[in-house]
Structure formats: C-alpha cells, structure tokens
Amino acid sequence: MSPTPSGRKAMISKPIVWMALLALTTPLLASDLEKEERWREQVEDSIMDGESVDLVVEGRNVFAIYTEAEEGSDKGLIVVHGTGIHPNWQQVVQPIRVEMAGYGWNTLALQMPILHNEAEYEEYVALYPEVPPRLRAAEAFLKEKGIQTIVIAAHSQGATMASYYLSRHASDAKGLIAIGMGATQKDSHVNSAESLKQITIPVLDLYGDDDLPGVLETAEARKAGAAHNTRYSQQVIEGANHFFDGVDDELINAVVDWAQQF
C-alpha cells in the first residue's frame, strides 16, 4: 500500500532533520585538508632533524615536527609558519626549528590551516577560528613532554595567527617572537595591531629593513597597539627581506638573544 500524503511528508522530513542535525554537530573545516596531506607526504620523508608527530586536534591528526634539544631542557618553542606552507619550510621556519634545538630549546613546528594556492590573503580570515585548537594542542604536546617554559615563534601570517590566539585565549605561552608580522587585515578582530592591545606577555616584533610593505608600513601601528606592554620590543635586522634570505645567522642570533630571558 502506498504511503498517505502525510506519511510521505514524514518520510521526506526525517532525512532533512537528520541533515540539519549533522550540520550542527559536524565542524566545518575551512582548511584545505587535502593540501595539508600533500604537504605531509612531500615533507615527512625529507626530515633530517627531528621526527614527524601527530597532534590530535578536535578528533583528527595534524602534522607536526618535534625536535629535541641537544641537551636536556624544559624549554619548548612552538614554530608557526606563514601563508599556505608547511612546518619544514626552508626559509625562517626550518632554520629556527633546527637551530634552536642547539640552544637548549625543544622545538615543535606544526601545520597551520591553509588554503588552495590561488587563495587571496584576506580569504584566510575564515581560517582563524581553526588556529586556537592547533596551538592549544601544540602546548599540550610540549607539556606532556615535561616542558615548563613555552614560547611561540611565528612568521608572517603565522605571527598574526599567533597574536590572534594569544589575545583571545588562555595560553601557557610565556612569550611571542613575531617575525615579519604585518597589520594590514581589514577585519579588525584578526589585525595584529589590535590583537597586541590584549597581549601582556613579552613580545619581540622582529622584521627586516627590506621587509614587505605591509610589515614596514604598520610597524608604528603595532608599536602603538602594544604601548601598554612594557615587555614589547621591536628589532630590525639590516639587509633582511621578508624571508631573511642570506641572513639566517642574524635571524637566529636575534631569537637566541631575546629568548635568554626565559
């Protein structure tokens, strides 16, 4: 016997209700997860220093690289890459990840949310809600290793993501090294100059004298945003562009010198 009209309506409505509930309970991930996996496949076998690890973030694994300090240490450095790349990027990220292990820091470089290659810079605003869970997972990983002092070192948009996180969420991080951080985002809630107004831990705002316009032209805005923070400082490295090409030693020296306070 065919269902009555009311029965047909009920049969149709059940899937609709189920789909609505599923949409409410399933997190919508904006990051390009397939690209994240491709990066992992390309990078993992080429790691010379450190080891590949998984961070569990909201029920799924996120790629990271953990490098132990050459001598026993309870200090940990979370290394955050810039737009669209990976935790072993040869410019800025890999030098800090590897070299800081020789200066008594256990380092953890993690994969941040990314978009497709053609994505515009402002499109990344949609990814910022995915940033705090990843950084919290990184902190938890280091704490499980017995690490007591945690600092975040972040480059480019990764630095903006880190400032967004630290300005809005409880964190175990004791300091932030923001490298090549601009403040050009039109959305004020992700603009680093606005985020700095809420950060009270020590911050090193480090950039090159040949950095991107968005970094150089917003230096005063960032300084003004951090005016309340007596432990905020800016440092300019001569001859450095946004990726510190050819001045890795100067970059590492600046990071090491500042990190000695911890």
Image: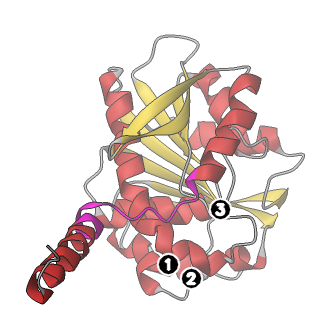
Task: Say if the magenta span includes residue 28.
Answer: yes
Residue 44 pos. (x, y %): 68, 28
Q: Residue beneath label 2, please?
A: 185
| Residue 31 in view, yes or no | yes
Viewer-proximal residue, 75 or 132?
A: 132
Q: Residue 99 or 186: which is nearer the viewer?
A: 186
Q: Earlier in the sequence, mark 1 or mark 2?
A: 2
Q: Mark 1 touching mark 3, by CB under 8 A?
A: no
| Residue range corresponding to the magenta coloring | 22-33
Residue, x 43% and y 58% (percent of image)? 131
Image spot of residue 91 (x, y percent)? 78, 46
> Is disc 1 surrounded by few (<14), some (14 to 19) or many (20+) residues within 10 Å?
many
Residue 208, compared with residue 216, is above or below; it is above
Residue 114 image point, x, y percent = 60, 59
Cα distance between the residues tagged 1 and 3 = 12 Å
What residue sits right under mark 3 in the picture?
A: 156
Q: Earlier in the sequence, mark 2 or mark 3?
A: 3
**Label 1 close to label 2 by CB (< 8 Å):** yes
Residue 217 quadrant: bottom right
Figure label count: 3
Q: Which mark is residue 191?
A: 1
Relative to 96, is 108 on the left or the right? left
Whole-angstrom CA distance, mark 1 to mark 2, is: 5 Å
